[in-house]
Image: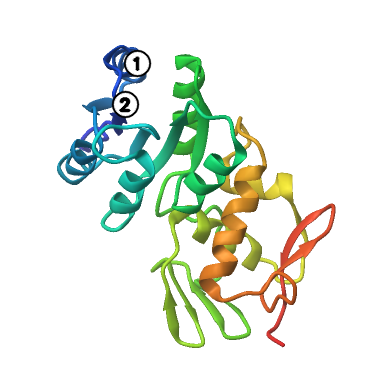
Amino acid sequence: MTSPPKPVRVLVVDDEAPIRSVVRGFLERDGMQVAEASDGPAAVEGAREFAPDVVVLDIMLPGFDGLEVLRRIRSFSDPYVLMLTARSEEVDRIVGLTVGADDYLTKPFSPRELAARVQALLRRRRGASATAGEDVLRAGDLVIDRPRREVTVAGRPVDLTTLEFAVLEALARDPGVVLTRQQLLDTVWGIDFVGDDHVLEVHVGNLRRKIGDDPANPRYVETVRGVGYRLRASDR
């Protein structure tokens, strides 16, 4: 007899108790196990002890802010992170995603929409390749080991987040073939992704930085203006 699957664990971090309570209710209604934190230090400690699959994380927190929480969590764990922000300036969204957020939602938000965003992230489960194929993919000295989920450039290990790895893997399945922005969003985030494609731009930028790629003269990830991206078939 197989044991039932473990419930998804979500850590909700916000300094406003009513917001935490409402979000908790919607997530628990979907069968998720929820823990709460109200400040930066408690959020990091909660992530260590609770080992969440998803963190719903407000930017403005006592102690230290959500961006610092995210940096610290990423040093020991790799959950999906949905950032909450009361600020509408684009720079906050960019900074949040640069340190490893998977999606963002601006306050005020619908708890129903937040729950839908969490479900959309979870549909792309960690550790599973989207399609069958070769175990090791190569583009010049860039090597992607799919079973181990490891990437090296000229033998140097590259530490990618789950989403960065998924973007690179999607491009590497057919080197030289252009994937539109929508194709990448559908493949990596899921066809029911309800955010905007700015998320993709930020993750591609982070990926390029980590593999040492110059967007103006790319060796690996090439932008096809007005269409999308492709992985160069060979190093140059």
Question: Dividing the image into 4 quarters, which one contains the N terminus?
Answer: top left
Q: Is residue 8 above or below residue 25?
A: below
Vertical side of 18 occupied by 213: above or below: below
Q: Are marks 1 and 2 in contact (CB under 8 Å)?
A: yes
Callout 2: SS: loop
Amino acid of disc 2? Asp
Residue plotted at (74% across, 72% down): 216
Find residue 15 and report its horizontal and vertical position in percent.
29, 24
Q: Which mark is residue 14?
A: 2
Colour setup of the view = rainbow
The residue carrying mark 1 is 19
For this orientation, the residue located farthest to the right is 226
- At mark 1, the secondary structure is helix
Evaluate whether residue 203 shows in this view: yes
Left of 86 or right of it: where is 181?
Answer: right
Query: Residue at image x 78%, y 61%?
Result: 178
Q: How many marks?
A: 2
Q: Position of residue 27 (x, y in %)?
A: 35, 20
Which corner quadrant of the image does residue 69 belong to? top left
Question: Which residue is at the front of the view, 90 or 113?
Answer: 90
Give me the residue at 41% from left, 68% from top.
159
Q: Nearer the viewer, residue 168 or 56?
A: 56
Amino acid tagged 1: Ile
Query: Which quadrant of the view contains residue 230?
Result: bottom right
- Specify whether 33 is left or right of 118: left
Left or right position of 111 against 194: left
Q: Residue at 51%, 87% (x, y): give it.
A: 154
Where residue 146 appears, as percent x and y from the top left, is 47, 67
Few, some or many C-alpha atoms within 10 Å of disc 1 (few <14, some 14-19, many ≥20)? some
